[in-house]
Amino acid sequence: MLAGTGSVHAAIQSKTIEYQQGDTTLEGVLTWDDAVAGPRPGVLIVHQWLGITDYEKHRAEMLAQMGYVAFCADIYGKGIRPANTDEAGVEATKFKSNRALLRQRVNAGLDQLKKSPLVDAKRVAAIGYCFGGTTVIELARSGAELSGIVSFHGGLDSPTPADGKNIKCPVLVCHGADDPLTKPADLAAFESEMRNANVDWRLIKYGGAVHAFTQPMAGNDNSKGFAYNERADRRSWQDMKLFFGEIFK
């Protein structure tokens, strides 16, 4: 079912799509501007730990307005949408503790995006938030064919750092400089992983920002370790746009 996301004359369209990973049915959302003709770059969006929400759908609309085709991938499975942080923690842990399965799920989403006739399959990037930021890095570590990835306040740890050698694309990490959820050792290990694998990478730290700095639903109390930061949100989105300008030129 297609539905305009604005007025009856709106050019932004969305479609819910069921797809498979093994025996599991997944449900993602494809979003595009129907005023744009021909295949164009695609952007895979991987959700935070609550699964696909209006937040990811809004980011997809923003990307569609920029001329991209966006696909909100579903890591958890159709109908699995945590109602609270306790449920979200259970679901996220299933995949963070099983990186092989996480890679299979996110690659299924990437394959689905590339199948769209609206997408130039040779020009596809992936972005992710929190849990999704971790996931897109794992997507790159899996050796997926991508133009680039962007991780927004994602976890940077890796149980298999040697997999950095599989990364075939540029990497942008947008990181809260005061994020208490990322241990200094994990940050240092990530940098070493990128250097040792000769990855084209960049890590941008945003002063005053903690975890979840792009997400208004995180509140504004930095003392909790996660909070929205309008300035870091705006700047990181601009940094992503500049990155896309390079990889999709």
Image: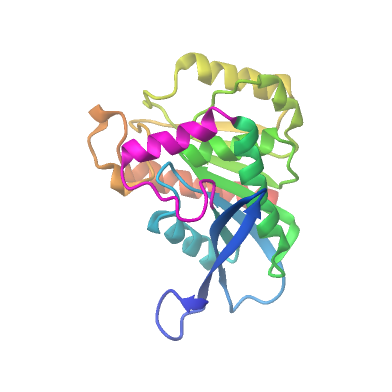
For the record, the magenta segment spans 74-98
218 or 2: nearer the viewer:
2
Q: Residue furthest top?
A: 185
Coloring basis for residues: rainbow
Is the residue 139 above or below the residue 179 in the image?
below
Is the residue 201 above or below the residue 218 in the image?
above
Task: Name the residue at 71% across, 20% down.
Answer: 162
The image shows residue 104 at horizontal and vertical percentages of 66, 41
Left or right: 212 in relation to 140 = left
Q: Quadrant of residue 225?
A: top left
Give the quadrant of the C terminus. bottom right
Left or right: 230 in relation to 248 = left
Q: Is residue 17 magenta?
A: no
The image shows residue 144 at horizontal and vertical percentages of 73, 42
Q: Is residue 83 magenta?
A: yes
* Total labels drawn: 0
Task: Name the residue at 54% across, 65% down.
Answer: 64
Left or right: 1 in relation to 215 = right
Q: Residue 189: tell me if it is visible.
A: yes
Q: Residue furthest front?
A: 23
Q: Quadrant of residue 200?
A: top right
The image shows residue 56 at horizontal and vertical percentages of 45, 55
6 or 77: nearer the viewer:
77
Q: Residue 171: tell me if it is visible.
A: no
Task: Name the residue at 45% across, 60% down.
Answer: 57
Is the residue 166 above or below the residue 119 in the image?
above
Is the residue 179 above or below the residue 230 in the image?
above
Task: Name the residue at 52% across, 74% down.
Answer: 13
Q: Residue furthest bottom?
A: 8
